[in-house]
Amino acid sequence: MKKMIAKSVASLTVAACLSGAAIAGDNPNDPAEGWNRAMFSVNEVLDTAIAKPVAQGYDYVTPLPVKAVVGNFFSNIADLMIGANNLLQGKPSDAFNDWGRVLVNTTIGIGGAFDVASEMGLDKHYEDFGQTMAVWGAGEGAYLFWPVIGPRTVRDTAGFVVDSYTDPVWYIYPVDVRNTLVGVRYIDQRAALLPTDKIIEEGATDKYAYIRDAYLQHRRNAVYDGNPPREAALPNGKAPVELQSTPGSGRGAK
Amino acid sequence: MKQLFSLLAGVFLLAGNAFSADEAPDVLVKRVTEEVLTIVRTDKDIQSGNSKKAIELVETKVLPHFNFLRMTSLAVGKDWNKASPEQKKRLAKEFETLLVRTYSNALTAYKSQTIVYKPLKMQPGDTDVLVRTEIRQPGQQAVQLDYGVEKQDNGAWKVYDVVVAGISLVTNYRETFAQEVRNGGIDGLITTLADKNKQVDAKNEKKS
C-alpha cells in the first residue's frame, strides 16, 4: 500500500514536471503553472468522483429551508473570526457589527439557525486572515492550486493555515461530531458553487486559466471590500477611471 | 379633434423618445433586469434548464443594451489593435455568442433570488458609471452583480462590463486570450472561440 502511494506520488510528480516543461510558464502571474495544472487535474478527478456528486445529492434531497439553516449555522460561527479580522484590519465598527450578529443570531436566531441579524440591518461581511495580511501590506505572491482546498495565492495559503487554526469548528469535542460538522460544511460550500459549474464549463476556453483569473479578481475585490479601484488603461485611448480606494476602505465609503 | 389626437400622439412619441434616450443608467439596468427576471421566474422551460430559451431571452431583451465591440476590445486587451477591421468583427461575433451564454447561465443559476439595486454614485457629466446590484438568496452569501455602463454618442447608455462577485466576465478572458494570440495569432483566437461555441451548441442541442 505504502509502495503504491509512493509510486503514484512519483508518477504524479513526473507528470507535473512534464506538463510544466510543455507549458513553460510564460505568464508572469503564474510562475508555478506547470505544477498547478497537474494539481488542477488531480482535483478535477477528485471533484468529479466525490465532492460534486455528494454536493449534488445534498442539493437534491435537502429542502431549501433546511439548506438555509445549515448555511446560517456555519455562517454564524464564522462571524466570530470575521469580526476579529475586521478589528485587525482597523475597522472596529465592522467588528462590533459582526459580533453583534453572533449575539443576535445565537440567541434570537436559535443557535444560529436563522439569520435574524441581517433583517435587523446588521450586514454580513466576509473577511479572513489572507485579507487582513493584504490590508497590512502583504503582496499576494504566486498563485498556487492545491488538491481538495483549491486555489490560493501564497499569502492566502498562509491565511488559510491561520484561519484553520482559529476556526472554532475544529475545537468542537467529541472528535466525531467535529468531523461530521467539517464534512457537512465542506459539502454545503461545494453545493453553493454548483450553479457556477455550468457557467465555467460553457464559458471557459481554458478552464484552468479561467478559474485562476476569476479567483485572483475575486480576492482583489474581497480585499477592497467590494470596491476595488476600477480597471486602469482601457484600450481605445479612453482615460482610465480611477476611484479613490485603499485596501479595506471600501465598506466605509458605502 | 382628429388633429388634436395626432398632435397628442406626436407629443407622446417625442416624449417617449426623449425618455428612452435620457433613461439614466441605473434605471436602464433595473428595468431590463426586472423584465428578464419576470420571464425567468414564470417560464418553466428556462427554470428546468433550457439553455436555448434562456439565450433567446437574453438576445432579445439584453443584447440591444450591450456594446459588444467595446466588450471584445476590453477582453482582448492590447492585442486588439493588431486585429484588422474584419478580424475585429468576427472576434466580436464569437465573443458575443460566448458571453451571451455565460450571462444567461449566470442569470438562470439562481432560482430563488431577489435583486437589490444600490444607489447610483454619479456626478453630472459622467459618461462612465458603475451600476451596482446584489443578488440575495436565503442562507447564502449575497452575490455582487455590477454593470459598467457607458454613454454612447447618441445619448443612450450601453453596458460594456458585467462584474459578478468582483469577477469581470469580460476582462477575465484577457490572460487566456493573450495566450491564444501568442500561440496562433488573432485568427487562432477566433478559431478557438468558434470551436468552443460549436462544441457547447452541439452539447445543448443533444440535450434539448
Image (cartoon, coloured by chain):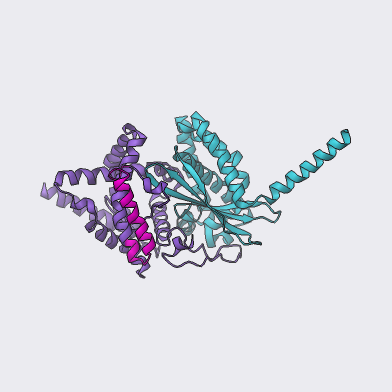
Chain colours: A purple, B cyan
The one nearer the camera, A24 or A91, is A91
Q: Position of residue A224 (x, y in %)?
A: 43, 62
The one nearer the camera, A167 or A146, is A167
Q: Main secondary structure of the magenta part?
A: helix
The answer to whether residue A89 is above or below residue A197 is below
Would you identify the image quadrant in which residue B148 lies? bottom right
The answer to whether residue A223 is above or below residue A108 is below
Which residue occupies the extreme bottom position in the image? Answer: A137
Magenta range: A85-113
The one nearer the camera, A84 or B198, is A84
The answer to whether residue B68 is above or below residue A223 is above
Q: Is residue B104 left or right of residue A119?
A: right
Would you identify the image quadrant in which residue A53 lies? top left
Would you identify the image quadrant in which residue A100 lies? bottom left
Q: Position of residue A176 (x, y in %)?
A: 15, 44
Which residue occupies the extreme front position in the image? Answer: A108
Number of residue marks: 0
The answer to whether residue B164 is above or below residue B3 is below
Q: Is residue B2 left or right of residue B40?
A: right
Q: Position of residue A194 (x, y in %)?
A: 37, 41
The one nearer the camera, B21 or A9, is B21
**Rendered residue at 28%/48% (across/down):** A42
Q: Is residue A18 visible?
A: no
Q: Is residue B31 left or right of residue A135?
A: right
Q: Is residue A118 visible?
A: yes
Q: Position of residue B101 (x, y in %)?
A: 51, 42
Residue A195 covered by magenta stretch = no
**Rendered residue at 74%/46% (across/down):** B17
